[in-house]
């Protein structure tokens, strides 16, 4: 529907723009005065949105007889006051590398639209208490909803982080990130960055920062605390620990998964214990972690992109498994697929593909020795993914395929704990 | 009072809970005291238009705002906990609002947009109240309706202690219709009538909740030479009139005070520069318990001179001293202040008052206020009192006040500017289609006036009776019963309007009394199985004995009607026992003996029959 609708025609005719004061007279005699707002994506196509003097927005439907008049052009938006970033040489310095997402948006009260924060400084200034914790160096690496983030973005981000440590000598790095794929990015960075000289902390928000109840501020403050003051030399995720604003949890980047669509405490450490918590600004670590080192951060960003993650389901056909260099099968139970898929798997492996098994149970370890199906698949050459999260196994396979010299090394690396992704023991927790 | 001559103007804002599911989720709109889970939160002021957070507001939020929410799984889900985005706007609730809009001839908007109104007192877990404008520009009788909105009710405040505010989440999200009238109301009585008319209209939809706390009424009042004052939380219809009367007197008096201050030549500068003295050491030996307590808690005693305010702080219709105290309390948290118009008192004697006056150089027109607290608190309190004192020079202060049970009002907060609202981006707009409006137009409930007319014509009720019946919300039940038992209309009416509420007041649970059971009662009454006087007793029995029937009640309560012969016998016995009295009083004995006879026969026979037999029997004796 490229045809111009009545609303667009009327706006064009009168030259009215968003923010202008207008009067609309409908053909039934109703008259509305207000400020012209941007068209809402779910509004009827012929509806003009007005903000009335009492603050309410309403939709006015345009018909052939509707008249409109611009009463006043919009006021120019005031320039934002220039800001000086405070600096205190006694405090640690943390680099904030913006990537987009819920944590970093603000509302334009004139139009009511929600915009992403354009600078990481915007973000730091929206939570000014962060300057009590550390000095902030801010930079936007990219502005993406997390579902749009690609492998190239991980690579860029990893290089930027390494540079912040190696060149700018920051104590830690905070990466505000959309929550949907934050676990993937955390895992990717975990494999790409070695010999970390400080913490890399990914942080997000489940409630956008334009609302008073947002979890963004607390998450960000605690992330900055971890980045500035902890001796962790790993990639971690810091998010709300429960639905109360009481503490945040420090999760290992290779073991963390978004387990709820909307709750503040959606992020959970799976098949392991969290590294610790932050409460009232104090870090309390509760399990072991890799300590930060000195020297230079090593960055290895090569990835094999011809990798797929395939969810196994009843009735699945061999053609449903794509031909790729690497495949993570998210199998049933201890690590199973149905017999009709064997032939395809066999063929792929014979042609040099690597197939790794993870479980759709999410919780627990792969064990392909218990049932005949598992044993059959092992015989075919499927690599059992231990207690790795499917997403982590997927990211790891990309990284391993780009770094291993031969099949034997691929297999060995996939079964070796590189960045905390495999735990030797599965401890009971409730 | 001639309200026209003083330029009285008022508008009403009525909030009524709707009897549907919640506005943005599928939870039942149910109040409950059970608690299944709790959590706590902070709220932060959001960034301003320029992308900054106001430091003062931030400090404020850090100091005060810590919220504990308790909730029941029966009446809340993750939406109330702000752990899940809101669902789409409840269509049933919207239909009720569109129905009301249609009944007052208001024009619905073409598309409804849900807005967020920032509220960071914790009463909304999200930090804002969701509200949507549905219709504009209607009329009810002679009063304009400016706006009709649909919004979500806030959480219920349960307790506030040590900077922790405890809210119950059950009420959060219950749909409210908000009706705002124009400032067309001309007298306090008119305000009450208008509220009554709106209330009847709302009840006519059959989709509004009934009972205490389901309707909240705010009143805007101004008089000539004054300012707009908004009064929140008036609980009943009758209170509206009384609050409006008292508020008018208060505003008139404030204008009088303004004139007096002018005569006394008090200027803003005099108040701003009024002396404050530390009187702590002078009050060391004061016998006042409040003073003693303050000193033990290491507080101090400060005195602020109030130039020109002597005799103006505590008058019949206004209590400026209390206004000062509430301003001080809101700003600083100080417990209260003591002002010169209430002294000597509180254990502070004439001598001490004299000493204070001397020290701050009061002449006969000057007043003063005493502050008892730690120095930093007093500083904020004095600032607030000065601010309020300056406002007294202008007469009526623009402000939001709270209605109190004695119909007076108390300062709450300054009048907000245009509400800062922005779109609720999580809820899609709703187009109000022609089809929807047509359907609503075809199914409009009977208007209250029509219903009144019909009820009075069909059942021969008088004006008061129809009014009461419609207010009670029992008209459906009444009509069903009255159609079946036309002879018992009055008894049916009395049962619904008096008996049931009276039993409830007695603490009898009348939940089990449904229309089927009432039908049984009136069927038996119609057959003459008992007298109509026995109806309350029978209903009480049925309420207290679930599963029992009218016959059981008659048997067990001994309410079976007596034949004329039996009645005559009982009456003769009573007369014989008091034969001297009857002889002496003659026919005048009927009245006093009726009480005695009724005690024996109540519920067993019709009152009129008893009365006529008694008369006959007395006449026979004479």
Image (cartoon, rainbow, N blue to C red):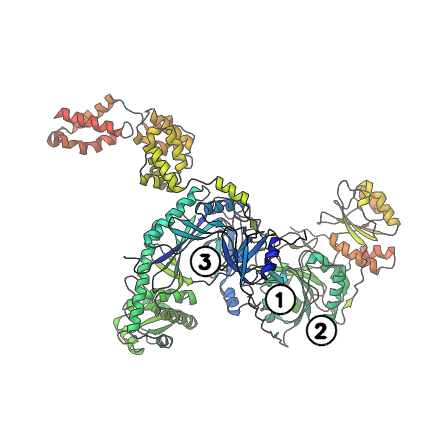
The chain ID associated with circle 3 is: B
- The answer to which of B553 and A291 lies nearer the viewer is B553
Compared with B269, A45 (above or below) is above
Q: Are marks 1 and 3 in contact (CB under 8 Å)?
A: no
Compared with B262, B85 (above or below) is above
Q: Which residue is mark 2?
A: A169
Seen in the image, is B568 located left or right of residue B453? Answer: left
SS assignment at label 1: helix
Q: Earlier in the sequence, mark 1 or mark 2?
A: 1
Q: Nearer the viewer, mark 1 or mark 3?
A: 1
Q: Nearer the viewer, mark 1 or mark 2?
A: 1
The chain ID associated with circle 2 is: A
Residue A314 visible: yes
SS assignment at label 2: loop
Tell me the CA gap for discs 1 and 3: 33 Å
Residue that lies at the very extreme toward the left in this rendered image:
B584
Seen in the image, is A281 located left or right of residue B392? Answer: right
Disc 3 crowd rating (10 Å Cα; few below 14, some 14-19, many 20+) is few
Compared with B444, B545 (above or below) is above
Q: Which mark is residue B160?
A: 3
Seen in the image, is B154 located left or right of residue B143? Answer: right
Q: Are marks 2 and 3 in contact (CB under 8 Å)?
A: no
Q: Which residue is mark 1?
A: A123
Disc 2 crowd rating (10 Å Cα; few below 14, some 14-19, many 20+) is some
- Residue B159: x, y in percent? 45, 55
Q: Are marks 1 and 2 on the same chain?
A: yes
- Residue A76: x, y in percent? 57, 69
């Amino acid at each position: 529907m490229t045809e111009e609708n009545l609303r667009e025609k009327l706006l064009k005719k009168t030259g009215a723009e968003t923010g202008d004061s207008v009067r609309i007279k409908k053909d039934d005699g109703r008259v509305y005065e207000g400020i012209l707002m941007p068209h809402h994506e779910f509004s009827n196509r012929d509806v003009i949105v007005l903000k009335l003097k009492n603050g309410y927005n309403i939709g006015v439907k345009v018909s052939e007889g509707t008249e409109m008049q611009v009463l006043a052009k919009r006021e120019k938006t005031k320039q934002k006051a220039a800001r000086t970033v405070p600096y205190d040489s006694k405090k640690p310095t943390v680099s904030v590398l913006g990537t987009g997402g819920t944590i970093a948006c603000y509302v334009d009260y004139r139009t009511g639209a929600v915009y992403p924060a354009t600078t990481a400084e915007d973000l730091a200034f929206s939570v000014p208490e962060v300057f009590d914790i550390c000095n902030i160096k801010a930079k936007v690496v990219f502005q993406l909803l997390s579902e749009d983030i690609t492998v190239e973005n991980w690579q860029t981000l990893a290089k930027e982080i390494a540079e912040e440590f190696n060149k700018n000598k920051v104590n830690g790095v905070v990466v505000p990130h959309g929550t949907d794929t934050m676990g993937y990015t955390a895992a990717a960075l975990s494999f790409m960055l070695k010999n970390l000289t400080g913490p890399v902390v990914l942080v997000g928000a489940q409630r956008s920062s334009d609302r008073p109840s947002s979890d963004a501020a607390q998450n960000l403050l605690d992330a900055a605390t971890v980045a500035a003051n902890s001796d962790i030399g790993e990639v971690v995720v810091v998010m709300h620990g429960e639905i109360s604003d009481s503490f945040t949890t420090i999760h290992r980047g290779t073991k963390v998964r978004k387990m709820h669509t909307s709750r503040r405490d959606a992020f959970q450490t799976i098949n392991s214990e969290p590294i610790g918590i932050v409460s009232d600004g104090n870090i309390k670590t509760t399990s072991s972690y890799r300590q930060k080192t000195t020297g230079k951060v090593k960055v290895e960003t090569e990835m094999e992109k011809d990798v797929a993650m395939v969810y196994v389901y009843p009735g699945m056909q061999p053609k449903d498994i794509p031909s790729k260099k690497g495949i993570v099968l998210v199998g049933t139970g201890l690590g199973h697929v149905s017999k009709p898929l064997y032939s395809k798997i066999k063929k792929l492996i014979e042609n040099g593909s690597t197939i790794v098994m993870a479980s759709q149970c999410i919780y627990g370890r792969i064990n392909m020795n218990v049932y005949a199906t598992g044993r059959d698949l092992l015989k075919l050459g499927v690599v059992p993914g231990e207690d790795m999260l499917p997403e982590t196994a997927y990211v790891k396979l990309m990284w391993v395929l780009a770094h291993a010299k031969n099949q034997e090394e691929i297999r060995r690396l996939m079964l070796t704990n590189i960045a905390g992704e495999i735990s030797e023991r599965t401890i009971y927790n409730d | 009072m001639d309200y026209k001559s003083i330029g009285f103007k008022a508008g009403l804002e009525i909030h009524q809970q709707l009897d549907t599911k919640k506005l943005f989720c599928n939870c039942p709109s149910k109040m409950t005291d059970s608690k299944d889970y709790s959590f706590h939160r902070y709220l932060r002021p959001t960034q301003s238009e320029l992308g900054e957070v106001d430091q003062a507001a931030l400090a404020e939020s850090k100091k005060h705002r810590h919220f504990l929410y308790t909730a029941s799984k029966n009446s809340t889900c993750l939406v109330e906990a702000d752990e899940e985005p809101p669902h789409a706007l409840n269509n049933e609730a919207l239909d009720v609002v569109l129905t009301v809009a249609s009944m007052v001839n208001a024009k619905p908007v073409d598309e409804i947009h849900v807005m967020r109104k920032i509220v960071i007192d914790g009463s909304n877990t999200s930090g804002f109240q969701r509200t949507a404008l549905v219709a504009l520009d209607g009329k009810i009788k002679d009063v304009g309706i400016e706006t009709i909105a649909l919004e979500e009710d806030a959480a219920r405040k349960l307790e506030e202690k040590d900077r922790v505010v405890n809210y119950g989440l059950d009420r959060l999200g219950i749909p409210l219709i908000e009706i705002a009238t124009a400032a067309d109301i001309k007298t306090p009585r008119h305000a009450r009538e208008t509220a009554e008319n709106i209330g009847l209209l709302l009840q006519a939809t059959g989709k509004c909740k009934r009972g205490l706390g389901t309707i909240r009424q705010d009143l805007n009042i101004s008089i000539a030479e004054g300012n707009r004052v908004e009064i929140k939380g008036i609980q009943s219809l009758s209170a509206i009139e009384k609050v409006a009367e008292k508020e008018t007197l208060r505003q008139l008096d404030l204008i009088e005070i303004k004139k007096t201050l002018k005569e006394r030549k008090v200027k803003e500068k005099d108040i701003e520069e009024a002396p404050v003295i530390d009187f702590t050491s002078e009050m060391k030996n004061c016998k006042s318990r409040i003073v003693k307590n303050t000193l033990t808690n290491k507080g101090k005693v400060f005195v602020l001179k109030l130039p020109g305010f002597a005799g103006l702080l505590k008058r019949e219709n206004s209590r400026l001293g209390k206004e000062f105290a509430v301003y001080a309390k809101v700003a600083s948290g100080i417990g209260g202040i003591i002002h010169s118009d209430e002294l000597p008192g509180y254990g502070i004697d004439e001598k001490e008052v004299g000493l204070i006056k001397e020290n701050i150089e009061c002449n006969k027109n000057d007043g003063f206020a005493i502050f008892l607290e730690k120095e930093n608190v007093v500083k904020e309190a004095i600032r607030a009192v000065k601010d309020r004192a300056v406002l007294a020079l202008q007469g009526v202060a623009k402000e939001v006040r709270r209605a109190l049970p004695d119909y007076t009002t108390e300062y709450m907060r300054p009048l907000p500017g245009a509400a800062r609202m922005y779109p609720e981006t999580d809820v899609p707009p709703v187009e109000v289609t022609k089809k929807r409006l047509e359907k609503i137009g075809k199914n409009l409930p009977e208007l209250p006036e029509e219903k009144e007319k019909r009820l009075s014509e069909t059942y021969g009720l008088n004006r008061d009776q129809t009014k009461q019946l419609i207010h009670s919300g029992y008209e459906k039940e009444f009509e069903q019963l009255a159609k079946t038992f036309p002879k018992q209309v009055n008894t049916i009416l009395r049962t619904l309007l008096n008996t049931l509420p009276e039993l409830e007041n007695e603490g009898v649970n009348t939940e089990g009394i449904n229309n089927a059971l009432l039908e049984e009662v009136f069927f038996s009454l119609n057959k003459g199985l008992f007298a109509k006087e026995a109806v309350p007793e029978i209903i009480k029995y049925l309420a207290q004995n679930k599963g029992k029937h009218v016959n059981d009640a008659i048997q067990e309560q001994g309410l079976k009607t007596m034949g004329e012969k039996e009645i005559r016998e009982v009456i003769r016995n009573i007369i014989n026992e008091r034969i001297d009295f009857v002889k002496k009083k003659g026919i005048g004995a009927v009245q006093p003996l009726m009480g005695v006879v009724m005690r024996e026969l109540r519920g067993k026979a019709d009152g009129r029959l008893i009365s006529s037999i008694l008369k006959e029997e007395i006449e026979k004796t004479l």
